[in-house]
Amino acid sequence: MPRIERSAHVTWEGTLARGAGHISADTGAFAELPFSLPSRVGNPDGKTSPEELLAAAHAGCLTTGVAGELSRAGTPPEVLTVTARIVMDEVEGKGHVIVASEVDVHGRVSGIDEAEFARLVEIADEGCPFSILIKATASVTVRPHLDSNEESVGETYG
Amino acid sequence: MADRRADVTWNGDLLGGSGTIDSVGSGALGPLDVSWPARSEDASGGKTSPEELIAAAHASCFSMAFAGALAKAGTPPQRLQTSAIVTFVPGTGITMIALAVEGTVEGLDEDAFRAAAEDAKQNCPVSKALAGVGEITVDARLSA
């Protein structure tokens, strides 16, 4: 199996409370994104944060996983829209802890019912590398939503 | 409590289809293209991937924890430069994260800098969340 490396780099200046940093992706997909403690734990004020990047990672990971399971089952998706939320809380004695990831998976897929869609989303969740890691330390909720396909409804009633 | 969100759209099957990280709650990034070949082959074609986003999350989280620990010890950093490399083996998972940090800090020796880096690696929220990764390493160097 190939071994893939992906990397990013960060520059930080100053203390935690008053300092600030910048994040760049080594693919060049994004660069020099500012971040700071106030924007991480309070109002983001247009700035990203480690938790937001994890939300993007989880949404991206599950999206490819669900597309893969649906494709393998012979019912590739027309469109998937996935939203992930990472929740960080202050836990007594432990400081800031990432406590949850909540993901909504909306799919428009022909030739599949809700139960089968939910089953394939669950298999994707079990295989998604990020889900596997985060489940060991936080609660993960993945909610499948099969969007009604107007064309197939039309065919049913037509 | 901080709640951070991201939205992704995917069109088509896994191998031939492609997706977009449309937006994030802060508005700081997106839309960013993603695809399976760009994720699972050496050449990314300039596209990001979940693993690169994890690298960005970990490098930024570690930098903040390290800055916090150094400031608490009375030796706040002037500058920290951190990289994170995430190793992904398709079919197996994320097997390793290698952090590397170079810092400019006055009044601190190399051993104390390394010890504080090790501590930040153990305690930053992303390290804790990803504790299941088999190997997380940190290489810490004090700038001359």
Image (cartoon, rainbow, N blue to C red):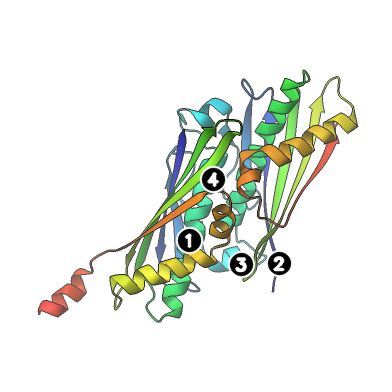
What SS does tag 4 mark? helix
In three-dimensional space, the C-alpha distance between marks 1 and 2, rounded to whole angstroms, equals: 20 Å
- Judge if badges 1 and 4 mark residues of a common chain: yes
Q: Quadrant of the C terminus of chain B?
A: top right
Towards the viewer: A22 or A140: A140
In three-dimensional space, the C-alpha distance between marks 2 and 4, rounded to whole angstroms, equals: 22 Å
The location of residue B25, given as percent across then percent down, is 42, 40
The residue type indicated by label 3 comes to Ser
Find disc 1 in the rendering and name its residue: A62
Whether residue B46 sits left or right of residue A117 in the image: it is: right
Q: Which mark is residue B40?
A: 3
The location of residue A94, given as percent across then percent down, is 61, 34
Furthest residue toward top = B74
Q: What chain letter is assigned to the residue under label 1?
A: A
Residue at (70, 47) in percent of width and height: B84
Find disc 4 in the rendering and name its residue: A53
Q: What chain letter is assigned to the residue under label 3?
A: B
Q: Residues within 10 Å of mark 4 (few under 14, many from 20)?
A: many
